[in-house]
Image: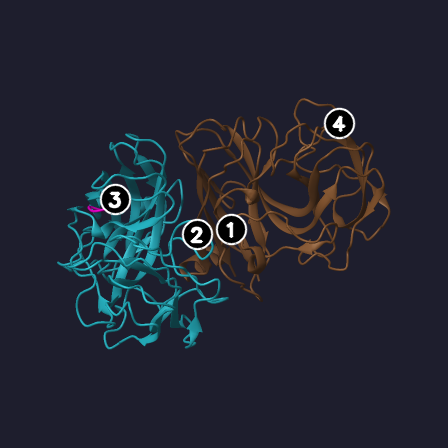
Chain colours: A cyan, B brown
Amino acid sequence: MAGYSSLDDFISSTTVDGKFVRTDWNKNVLPTTTQAAGLWYDLSCGAGNPGSDAAYGGGTNKAFQSLDDTSTTSPGIPHGGDVSAETKHIINASAFSAAATTMPAVFMLVDRLGFYPIRTVTTTGDQALDNTVVFPTGRHTNGAGLRAYVVCSSGAATTAMGAATPNIRMTYTNQAGTAGQLTPSVLPVGTTAAPKGNIVYSGTGAGKYGPFMPLAAGDSGIRSVQQFNLSASYLSGVLNLVICRPLLTLPMTTIGVAAERDLLNQVPSLPRVFDGANLSWLMYAGAATPVNSAFYGHLDFGYS
Amino acid sequence: MGFATVTELVDAEVAGQSWYSTWRKSPSQVSTIGIWFDLSMSPGSPVPQYYAATPLVGAPMSYSDEQGLYHGRNVAPATKHLKRLTVLSGVATALPMPMMLCDYLFYYPFIDEGSTDEQALDNTLTLPRYTDGAGVQVMAVSVAGRTGGQTFTIGYTNSDGVAGRVSPAVIQNTVSVNGSIVTSNRATARASGPFIPLQAGDTGVRSVETVTMAGADVGLFALVLVKPLAQLQLRGIDAPVEVDYFTDFGQLPTIVDDAYLNFLACPSGSLAATPLHGDITVVWN
């Protein structure tokens, strides 16, 4: 039987059998613009280890592109490769920063399944998305638990989205296979001149959410997304509708003090990391965070 | 509906039947130590509301009308429950600070403290949730400052449907800041906590019919009916407070569909320029 059947089994597996992986990571916050307090950011767009994303915005416009742990243009945090038919779980996590004015902050670890690049940001109304490539199999069951967020990747000629505040809506198929599900009102509102890496509807005010796009009543997941809709032109820039599975959160308040999460004893959950998972951090900035501020941490994985 | 076993709770979370959302309140009000404060009137996300409606006419509150903390959409026939709250701050002035998450149900706006007549409240509309009033409490929120020191009573119908119930006389504090709970004062005899005391034996309020000031003052307040859901204590700036209501307290408070959620707080100093950050996680089944 995959997974841990008891605490004895866990200890034996991680010690006697050595089925344990530790990975240290280092991510800088965004390189171009100070992160504003109260907004969410996708740290895959920052420098560090793993390296900065170079996939967002690329490929066929509006066509889903999958991400996994072998992606070189948008790498995730290494977690030791496939372990099937066993299952892999996160045991511990930590994050800290010694950089000034980086606190408070909340980090969220997600498995990014992929993204729809949307370069047609001046187009209003429904834009059909291409689902020729499907969400990676084996990392979800019918989309249960999957979430979506919209992040700016700017593009070669721009450093931010245009000076506009369009409403954002998606039409999707939910975890039960029901098509035509809509983002409910109050619709998310894009931030004017949202910088690269910013989750564009996060923040303060009406129509601001963090970090995920709201789902319709009763929905708990996303199988696929059929339409992306801007109520008005975003004038310039590039958006990406990212599909992910949230795994854990790490709130931190103090510079130089590590936030540590024990997912066996403190928050008994042992989040599962599926084969191929592309692990990346989202960050809620609690203060104006200077460009390239460095965060460090580690993840412990076990499998059985 | 709900969770019969721990396995059902785990299975629901694995199936994605949960929602995580962040919030941020950044009060501008210079609040007072030991005086409970209504964070729904502070700037931030969710957007503030100001109890602005026709004077003395009861008005229901809901997520779909006033927003409040985002807790995902309606889940009926499933039931939604509070799983976890996190709060953190980088400014120490107001800490330590107890906080209380409430479902804001109904309010009677602009009660005039300048009149010592019995003021009749309009109950054409009724409670949108917790309709029998079980566990529903009443708080008096300042919307225009006063000199303070006067007392008042409310006449209400309790959660058993008995009309004509009368609260003990409660004394008003001298705090003029909008959003302050006017009956809250740690240093004054006959002052209450965040809620107006009820007549002996009563545990909830279905509606409020009258308000009577014993002496005139210059302020205005709103009477707000809330259902307290959960409490926590933000102790300092050196660590977030994280409460998992299942593992820490063995309970999963119910969040009714379309609930308007927000916080009361009792600061140890001014809340002005004290950003409060946090998240809420709900789970349903």
Mark 2 = which residue?
A: B21
Identify which amino acid the numbered label 3 is placed on.
Asp
Residue A241 percent location from the top left of the image: 30, 64
Front disc: 3 or 4? 4
Circle 4 marks a residue in which chain? B
Identify which amino acid the numbered label 1 is placed on.
Leu
Residue A53 visible from this viewpoint? yes
Residue B52 percent location from the top left of the image: 64, 50
* In the image, residue A115 above or below residue B153: below
Residue A141 percent location from the top left of the image: 35, 68
Q: Quadrant of the N terminus of chain B?
A: bottom right
Q: Residues within 10 Å of mark 1 (few under 14, many from 20)?
A: many
Mark 1 = which residue?
A: B69
Query: How far is mark 3 from mark 4, CA to CA?
Result: 55 Å
Front disc: 2 or 3? 2
Q: Residues within 10 Å of mark 3 (few under 14, many from 20)?
A: some
Identify which amino acid the numbered label 2 is placed on.
Ser
Front disc: 1 or 3? 1
Circle 1 marks a residue in which chain? B
Q: Which residues are magenta?
A: A30-34
Query: How far is mark 2 from mark 4, CA to CA?
Result: 39 Å
